[in-house]
Image: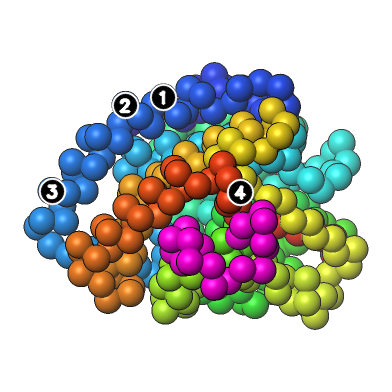
Amino acid sequence: MTDYSQKASEYPMGKPNEPVGRILVALFDRQIAEADDLGRTESSRQAPPRFTYLRYNSECSLMWLDLQHQLWLSTLNGRLHTTVLPNEVNSILDIACGTGAWALAMTHSRPSTQVIAFDLTPPNIKPPPNLQFVKADAEKPWPFGQFSFIHGRMITSGIHDWPRLLARCWDHLEPGGWLELLDVCHPYRLEEDPTADSDPSPFIQFGDITERCWSSSGLDFRASTKHIERLRDLGFMDLDEEEFKWPLGEWPVTQHERRMGAFTLENFNRFLNTAAVNLLQHNADLDEQEARNIVANVQKDVAENSSTRHFYLTIARKPVEV
């Protein structure tokens, strides 16, 4: 069992000029071969089920989530959230906490605040006194009371009913509380032409195919574009939204953006290596070789053309106040 509490304390906390994530990338490289071998063995035994949401149970997948944590820290210039919170916050809820890296960091920065972090497979570690990990499903009634601040990050791959989830956030927020949601939003884009949906690039076409795959399983990877209207209808006030770009590769000008590009490329490649083939095979009705060919073409396209065509992913954050 990996001691993620110790590991989180060893990682840099995302200061703008620090090379955060380099240790994570190295750990990924050491473990990916074993994970790939396991994946090939398992796939030879039986076909994986149709994707209805992504779950992260393997060691390699958990390391992938920790890499995403460092990527978000870099995106937000070392901040754990963009919502301006008062010095004293009674309680915090973290939806679908993954490895617990964000929740652990929050308890470290706010030792007097009680934090509850839940997931279908919560981390198996001993948390600090002000943190509780709970096994729970975000799409079923939550076994909690109300909170001062609710946080959700990269949860689109597990949410099938966004109106119900947002209503649940409303019910579990204290009067005057805050909600912050951060996620990736389709479609994939080119810096040179952000509206190019029909671009022949395998990367752009892969984004379109995967979005249709997610949609066939009831997942909406453009949900963040609908949050403001849905939250307003629920009665939320002081709504704010902002989009960031995750460059794919080290093509940007500034050192900080190049580092983010390296993180994003590593994160994207982990998705290609661990989940993409099964997603295409079982949600796009492709045989294994067809799926592998598509993934190989995407990897080749990104490796050869990202520095000139400037691929990027769009992310959004939505801090709101009741």
**Separation (CA) of disc 4 from disc 3:** 36 Å
- Give the percent coordinates (x, y) of residue 164: 62, 76
Task: Check disc 2 and report its element: helix, strand or loop.
Answer: helix
Task: Name the amino acid type tagged 4.
Answer: His
Looking at the image, do the residues carrying marks 1 and 2 touch, with CB atoms under 8 Å apart? Answer: yes
Q: Which residue is mark 4?
A: 310
Image quadrant for the N terminus? Answer: top left
Tell me the amino acid under the disc marked 3.
Thr
| Helix, strand or loop for disc 1 | helix
| 14, 144: nearer the viewer | 14
- Could you tell me how far apart the alpha carbons at marks 3 and 1 are, in whole angstroms? 24 Å
Q: Give the number of the mark in front: 4 or 1.
A: 4
Mark sitting earlier along the chain (4/3): 3
Q: Earlier in the sequence, mark 4 or mark 1?
A: 1
Q: Residue at x 67, y 56 (%)?
A: 192
Residue segment shown in magenta: 189-206
Q: Position of residue 125 (x, y in %)?
A: 44, 33
> Which tag, 3 or 1, sits closer to the chain's start?
1
- Label 3 crowd bin: few (<14), some (14–19), many (20+), radius 10 Å: few
| Residue linked to disc 1 | 26
Mark on residue 41?
3
Magenta span contains residue 199: yes
- Residue 69 spot, x, y in % from top left: 57, 39
**Residue under pointer 2:** 30
Viewer can see residue 155: yes
Q: Which of the 4 image quadrants contains residue 109?
A: top right
Q: Amino acid at mark 2?
A: Arg
Question: Which residue appears at 58% of the width and 45% of the height?
Answer: 308
